[in-house]
Image: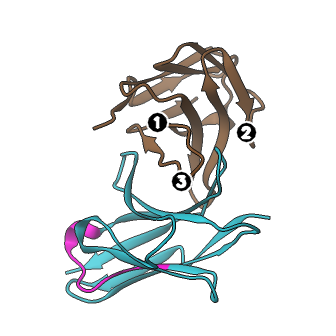
Chain colours: A brown, B cyan
């Protein structure tokens, strides 16, 4: 089974702190994604990456950056955390395909910014 | 334009009753459709997927969904609800590539 691991399940940070959320997948997937989940809004794409050092902005990239230095690892960075970034963050990965890509998700990182 | 609408953000059923979670989609090209389930404080798990071919798709835990092109629907059903089915369910649309369109989710409550 593909495993997507988000090392930090629960974090509490203060406004202005720099926050790193790490995601590691173990099945050599090219594509990796960061989503934000908020009640009533579903999942919204922050960034995705289709290869090492490659990234594409999603629907809500403002206030976030990403890093993909190795194929298996995709990091989400909040340069200066704000209270409106309190949310559940979900990492996912998939193989590239001309057909149906299936997303495999990590367990999520719940971030609270005080 | 691609979009997904899940009708009903909250659905309650009695244990043993039929589960029906509704999903309608809009897509300008043939869609791939998925249902994912999310248990509390966990990530999303794939329940089932429709790509091409048979329009009735069977998934895990007794769930199934039927792709109806004429109705642009992909409703999720289970004949008999179990307490362990209580979770959030997401309908997801994809075309080829890396674009995924999520519904806003339906929270299923199972009443004993």
Q: Earlier in the sequence, mark 1 or mark 2?
A: 2
Q: CA distance from mark 1 to mark 2?
A: 20 Å
Q: Is residue B37 magenta?
A: no
Task: Specify whether B45 is left or right of B61.
Answer: right
Residue pictured at 80% horizontal, 64% vertical: B1
Q: Where does label 2 land, which residue?
A: A58
- Foreground: B41 or A107? A107
Marks 3 and 1, the one that precedes in the sequence: 3
Residue A80 rendering spot, x and y as whole percentages: 70, 18
Mark 1 vs mark 2, foreground winner is 2
| Residue A66 falls in image quadrant | top right
User: Mark 2 vs mark 3: which is more N-terminal?
Assistant: 2
Q: Measuring from the top left, give residue B34's x and y in whole percent.
A: 49, 63
Side of B33 relative to B87 (left or right): right
Q: Which residue is mark 3?
A: A100
Q: Nearer the viewer, residue B67 or A74?
A: B67
């Amino acid at each position: 089974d593909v495993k997507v691991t988000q090392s930090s399940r629960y974090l509490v940070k203060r406004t202005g702190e720099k926050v790193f959320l790490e995601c590691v997948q173990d099945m050599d997937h090219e594509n990796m994604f960061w989503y934000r989940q908020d009640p009533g809004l579903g999942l919204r794409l922050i960034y995705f990456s289709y290869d090492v050092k490659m990234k594409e902005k999603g629907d809500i990239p403002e206030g976030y950056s990403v890093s993909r230095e190795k194929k298996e690892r995709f990091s989400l960075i909040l340069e200066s955390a704000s209270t409106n970034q309190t949310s559940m963050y979900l990492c996912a990965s998939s193989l590239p395909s001309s057909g149906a890509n299936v997303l495999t998700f990590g367990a999520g990182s719940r971030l609270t910014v005080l | 334009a691609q979009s997904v609408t899940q009708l009903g953000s909250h659905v309650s059923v009695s244990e043993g009753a039929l589960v029906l979670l509704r999903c309608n989609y809009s897509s300008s090209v043939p869609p791939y459709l998925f249902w994912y389930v999310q248990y509390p404080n966990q990530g999303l798990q794939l329940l089932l997927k429709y790509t091409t071919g048979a329009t009735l798709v069977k998934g895990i835990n007794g769930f199934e969904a039927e792709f109806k092109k004429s109705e642009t629907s992909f409703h999720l059903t289970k004949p008999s609800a179990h307490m362990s089915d209580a979770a959030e369910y997401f309908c997801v649309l994809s075309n080829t590539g890396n674009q995924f369109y999520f519904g806003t989710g339906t929270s299923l409550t199972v009443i004993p």
